[in-house]
Amino acid sequence: MPIHEKSLIRPENLVEHEHLVIDGVDVSGHWSTFIEGRSITDYNEAMQDEIAALPGGENIHRCWQCGSCTNACTVNAVNPEFNPRYWIYLIRLGMEQELLRDKDIIWQCVSCNKCTYACPRDVVPEGVMKATAHWLELKGHTPKSPSTHFDEGFAGSVIKTGKIEETRVLLGFFRRTGQPANQPWLARLVTGLVRRMPLGYLTRLGWGVVFRPRTRNWGAARRALNEYVHEVEAQNRAALGLDGQGRQ
Amino acid sequence: MTKPILIVGGGPAGLSAAHALASAGQEVVLVEKEDRLGGAPILQGYAKLVPSHEWAKDAIGGMVDRVTGRAGVTVMTGATVHGFDGTPGAFTATLKDGSRVEASAAILATGFTHFDSVNKPEWGFGTYPDVVTTVQVEQMISSGQGIRCPSDGRVPDRVAILLCVGSRDRQIGREWCSKICCTVSANIAMEIRELSPKTNVYIYYMDIRTFGLYEGEYYWGSQEEAKVKYVKARIAEVTGRDGRLLVKGEDTLVKRPISIPFDMVVHAIGMDPNVDNMTLGAIFGVDLNKYGYIAKPSTYAHLAETSRPGVFVAGAATGPETIDDSIAQGHAAAMAALNMVRAPSMAAE
Amino acid sequence: MDGNDLKKVAYYPGCALEGTGHAYNRSTKAVGKALGLDLVELKNWNCCGAMEVKNIDPKIQTYLSARNLSIAEDMGFDTVMAPCNGCYHNLKKAEYDLAHDAASVEVNARLSEKAGHQTYESGGVETIHALDWIKRAVGEDELAARVKNNLKGLKIANYYGCMYTRPRHIFPEKDKGPGSESTAKPHFMDDLLAAAGAENVDFPLKTACCGGAHSLSDSDTSTRLVLNILETAEACGAEVIATECPTCHTGLEMHQVRAEEVLGRKTNVKILYFTQLLGMALGLSQKKVGVQENLSDPRDLLRQKGLG
Ligand SMILES: Cc1cc2nc3c(=O)[nH]c(=O)nc-3n(C[C@H](O)[C@H](O)[C@H](O)COP(=O)(O)OP(=O)(O)OC[C@H]3O[C@@H](n4cnc5c(N)ncnc54)[C@H](O)[C@@H]3O)c2cc1C
Ligand code: SF4
Ligand code: SF4
Ligand code: SF4
């Protein structure tokens, strides 16, 4: 097979038999190379609707593939594989397998809204990225991303007390994602702080871990918010055809 | 004897209406805000027109000549209408200088306003002198000056034309296609290649709308004969580097970011509603559509009518239109107005 | 609204200003005092939802922000000032959603009623940023007249980040031509610091993203983004990056350290809140504006320039 053609083919589509004899001829190794079908054979027609049903995905159907989101994108500049325009195309047509190839980086959107600012159709690609990451998790294609852990920890704290306390959210985040909280750069950060912070401030940060800052009389709001979160989660699951436990 | 018909705006649409009415023996008063007739093609100095390849000054100049000085046509330049009262058959228009014009009907042919590229700062207009608009390129060609970078007068090696500048963009509230700029850009690209064969021209597009018969001559022609290159990318930003312009975007077909140096960048600017439309709407008592152009309540049965009986409309005042369509609409408006003022019920009054 | 009405406004510090953004809180209050402006903190406020809650559901964020607006209204204010970009952005977004989206209105009303407080309706309170506040309540001329310690010779890159300008539809008052703020090239901080005598450098990354949303969950990306901002500022000749948001500020400080530790790329540019700089220009001490809390340790540089 000519080299330049080989470069167009994804490695997983190349099949080679280590030992193969056909009609008495030994075609083991690269003599038996064949390429699996490369054509896309079906569309998942539910995919666009499902993602549009999740918060942020509402306007995905407006996209006309101009590429303004991708060329404005902060993350695309550091990782060219991060391509909102392309993913929106795949979702709109329901090319699920293609999308899944990039499933592990979609959550990395930093919500800078540069895409939203540039998009001539007001698709709000930032929202679509969030909805897509959410979809991937709900469908079980990806585990909860570090970002979802952070969001949930954070939102949990707000719903519980009305406020957040940074140290606590931080420690909780490291716990949930299984990261050690004593990474060297963090250590330098903390010692740098401790060296120069006014004592009163440090004490307060410390106290914050024990006695959380909280909004007074928050109980009724907490109950209302928890109720609402359950309602939304149930709606999201239903839109994706999942049952109460999140199963297909 | 019916009173004259008032035409506001002396561009292709207004000129066409004036000519049609005068030919039918109907008196007209043509009120034009600028100091000369001809509308955008003359006032902005367009070069060769789509689709006839005639120079604007000849083609539209000819339309101007055919009405100026003609019996039954009164031309008032440097004039605008400040008040408009009465009923069909008996309107009175008050002009800026206080004079009055009696009219049996009115035709609004007030056209459009060019999009101001300053409203898309990311594309470099106003910051870099070598970022220009299609209007400026038309002027470079029509003045005989040729294609030159405004910064230092050099002939550009490479020109990028960005389509849809000020059209098809919710971010700036412009949800329309300006219809003619794809074809005009292809035309300009071909002219640049003819005037300066060493200059390479690239057109950055989202869609190409060289509709109808423009397809073969302009879209295909620009590629097959003039070797103009088309790239499917909406540009993110235009910046400067080492005296050249850097055009950044995503080439969507190869799925890769691009950052390409150019000597000149041309904005294919769109056709905004006339900035006067709010005022015109209030003075003439006509509704605007949701985009800000003058509304036409009926698409099929009552051509050229506005929301106010006796007031008609034609051309780019109603939305982005080509010159030939504007001319056709000018004729249609003339016919509609004439039908009304000559109807037996009104002629009897 | 004229400047006079802004002499006394409701103040929404938000969670970050009680934590890592402590120095911003302190310097904002100190500057207000020095300029004769009154800040009245919202009573019993709650978190606006920051950047995270909307990812659970955007309407929760709308409710959380709207509750704060209803407190401002209750206290008789028609303007609330939020110095944190995240808070400012969220209150603005709530205002926009409650004016344009029926479903947000419905959820906000339902949650407010269950929580037992007055439902905020759009149009009641205007949210402004600390930059708007000083710019409109005092203005460059009066500010310049009050400067005791000119920032002369201090080269500053002004960094506004994401949430102050994007998405543009939640900031209808911006992009209104001369005098108004621009979402493409914001300049209010430049204007104020210039009035205090600073030399603003031409900084192309004013509204670049520092990766704040994933500062911890995707630190490698954040570090690369921040490093780019820091190195570009230095290449533009800046000695200081002025910030107007605790998330940006902490992100820059934190990843400056991380870039050095993890990537071995050291940068020396100092990171200061614009209120710290203004405070010192108005004659306040380094301590008063909390410079000792800045991780990039600008004390030597400031002393060299005779500040604080
Ligand atoms: C760069 C560019 C190139 C183009 N090239 C072509 C081409 O090659 N071929 C083609 O078919 N089309 C072309 N067009 C489109 C063409 O310009 C329009 O189709 C045409 O000008 C519309 O004619 P009009 O008479 O309706 O309006 P206009 O040409 O806009 O004329 C309106 C007239 O009304 C006057 N007026 C406005 N307001 C008032 C007022 N309040 N009171 C009194 N007078 C008023 C104006 O001064 C003007 O004279 C081009 C457009 C652009 C932007
Ligand atoms: S919000 Fe996300 S997708 Fe949009 S530009 Fe920023 S990082 Fe890219
Ligand atoms: S900018 Fe908007 S319309 Fe263009 S590709 Fe991205 S989402 Fe689609
Ligand atoms: S005619 Fe072409 S360039 Fe003009 S707005 Fe339409 S698509 Fe864009």
Image (cartoon, grey):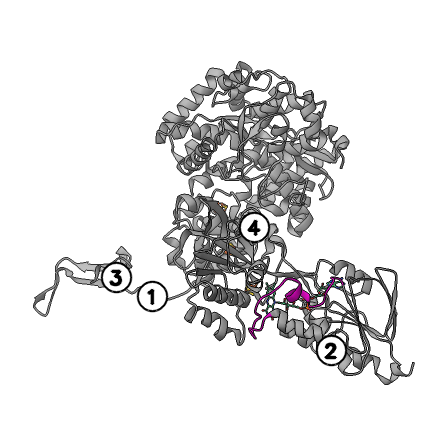
Q: Is residue C250 found left or right of B331 in the rendered image? A: left
Report x, y in % for residue C305.
54, 18
Q: CA distance from mark 4 to mark 3?
A: 43 Å
Task: Answer few, some or many: residues within 10 Å of disc 3's Cα (few below 14, many 20 plus, some between 14 and 19).
Answer: few
Q: Which mark identifies residue B125?
A: 4
* Residue farthest along the left direction in this orientation: A24
> Which quarter of the frame holds ligand 4?
bottom right
The residue wearing badge 2 is: B19
Q: Are marks 4 and 3 in contact (CB under 8 Å)?
A: no
Report x, y in % for residue A223.
61, 38
Front-lying residue, B311 or B8? B8
Report x, y in % for residue A71.
46, 50
> Which amino acid type is shown beneath numbered disc 4?
Phe
Task: Answer few, some or many: residues within 10 Å of disc 4's Cα (few below 14, many 20 plus, some between 14 and 19).
Answer: many
The residue wearing badge 3 is: A5
Front-lying residue, B127 or B203? B127
Q: CA distance from mark 4 to mark 1?
A: 44 Å
Which callout, 3 or 1, points at the residue further toward the start of the chain?
A: 3
Which mark lies nearer to you, 3 or 2?
Answer: 2
